[in-house]
Image (cartoon, rainbow, N blue to C red):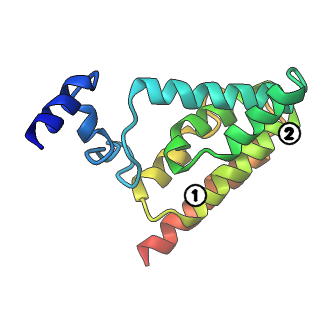
Amino acid sequence: MGFICLLALFLLDDPDDLLTDTTKRPHPLAPSLTQLSAEEEKKIEKIIDQFILADTGKIIGQSAQKAIADFKGLGPDAFFELIKGFNKAAEIEHSCPALTIARKLKNQLSRSKDRQLLQYARENLGVGVKKSKYSDVTRELKWTATQQQKKLGR
């Protein structure tokens, strides 16, 4: 039995991989989320970028279907990249991706019990977006975060 465990450790690229899934640390800006590696963040950013391309018609067919499915599969840990994606989509002035990302964010904000996550959203939604027809959507997302913070304060 000991030989098999030793062999398994030898065959792994990195023995620390055994600990990866069970030792995820809380994100320093939002403790309700796990801290992602730079590689995981880039993967999520790529998924969001591909979704924006699919939703604006710049990629079609199976590639677009995969991009949309990948986007729908994003979980709560994609929060920070979703904020960046929303800001990017609002800047390009194309309705579908900004509104779809906003819906996903609103759902997460309205259920969050993480005050720091809610504060981050209030401070970062719309950052870098000059003039956009989505300023009302940005205000609504910030309002959702504010209302959720107030609920938690009670």
Q: Residue at x 40, y 35 (%)?
A: 36
For disc 2, the marked residue is 96
For disc 1, the marked residue is 109
Depth check: give the residue in front, 148 or 111. 111
User: How far from the left and from the top, in percent, is residue 140?
Assistant: 71, 54
Is residue 135 found left or right of 110 in the rendered image?
A: right
Q: Quadrant of the N terminus?
A: top left
Is residue 88 depicted above or below 148 in this figure?
above
Q: Residue at x 56, y 34 (%)?
A: 81
Q: Amino acid at mark 1?
A: Leu
Is residue 37 depicted above or below 72 in this figure?
above
Depth check: give the residue in front, 26 or 71. 71
Counting every numbered tag in the picture gives 2
Depth check: give the residue in front, 106 or 63. 63
User: How far from the left and from the top, in percent, is residue 153?
Assistant: 42, 72
Outermost residue, left side = 2
Q: Residue at x 35, y 52 (%)?
A: 31
User: How far from the left and from the top, in percent, is residue 61?
Assistant: 89, 28
Instruction: Of the two numbered discs 2 and 1 on the same chain, state the one appearing first in sequence.
Output: 2
User: How far from the left and from the top, in percent, is residue 37?
Assistant: 38, 29
For the question of whether residue 29 can be seen, the reply is yes
